[in-house]
Image (spheres, rainbow, N blue to C red):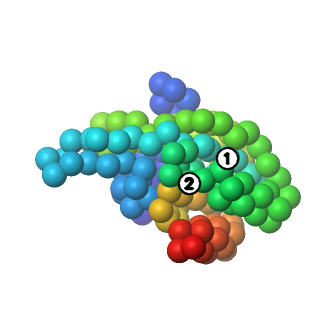
Amino acid sequence: MANNIKESAGGWALQITKPARKADLIVEDDDGEVTRLAEVYVYGFDSLLLIIDAENVSTSHRAELVASAAEDTNSIHQGAMSSVGIAGNGYQVQLPGCREAGFEIGNSAPTVVDQGLIVIHNRSSVQLAENLLTIRRSQVSS
């Protein structure tokens, strides 16, 4: 089940504990202690947000993902640095540009995930989200 976009002290955010682990945006030791919280880029497009690991996704790979999303949505909104942070018993990410991308507080925010990438979509953009994962998988395997 997808989490909902919420308002937090730093602005709009999304709880992403499971997706962040799967995308390697957080690293925990054997005792469950955090050893890495990723700095990320958040890019907004109509009905789509990309969260990209700033350290482990190369600039050229990031550019390819952003260009593809912009071309397929015919849009691009704010792109900004953000970070994964501890929130309650899990992790969340601040979402600059979320409103411009067409999301609102309380919206369900389904995600698809690959190494270094979380794509937040609304149900109408799920195919584009899957296409971006295909691009990312190709990048990782090359």
Callout 2: SS: loop
Q: Nearer the viewer, residue 16 or 63?
A: 63
Can you identify the residue that label 2 sits on? 57
Dividing the image into 4 quarters, which one contains the N terminus? bottom left
Above or below, 127 relative to 60: below
Q: Is residue 130 left or right of residue 87?
A: right
The location of residue 105, given as percent across then percent down, is 57, 41
Residue drawn at (83%, 62%), measured in percent from left and top?
71
Q: What residue do we see at 73% from left, 39% from top?
A: 78
Going 39% across and 40% down the picture, which residue do you hit? Answer: 37
11 horizontally vs 27: left or right = right
Q: Quadrant of the C terminus?
A: bottom right
Q: Is residue 100 left or right of residue 55?
A: right
**Which circle marks residue 70 in the picture?**
none
**Splitting the image into 4 quarters, where does residue 19 fall?**
bottom left
Outermost residue to the front: 142
* Residue closest to the eye, 108 or 26: 26
Residue 5 as seen in the image, left or right of residue 30: right
Label 1: element kind: strand
- Residue 77, quarter of the rendered image: top right
Q: Which residue is mark 1?
A: 43
Amino acid type at image mark 2 = Val
Horizontal and vertical percent position of residue 139:
59, 68
Q: Earlier in the sequence, mark 1 or mark 2?
A: 1
Q: CA distance from mark 1 to mark 2?
A: 14 Å
Residue that sits furthest to the right in the current view: 74
Image location of residue 102, percent across then percent down: 71, 48
| Cβ atoms at labels 1 and 2 below 8 Å apart | no
Q: Amino acid at mark 1?
A: Tyr
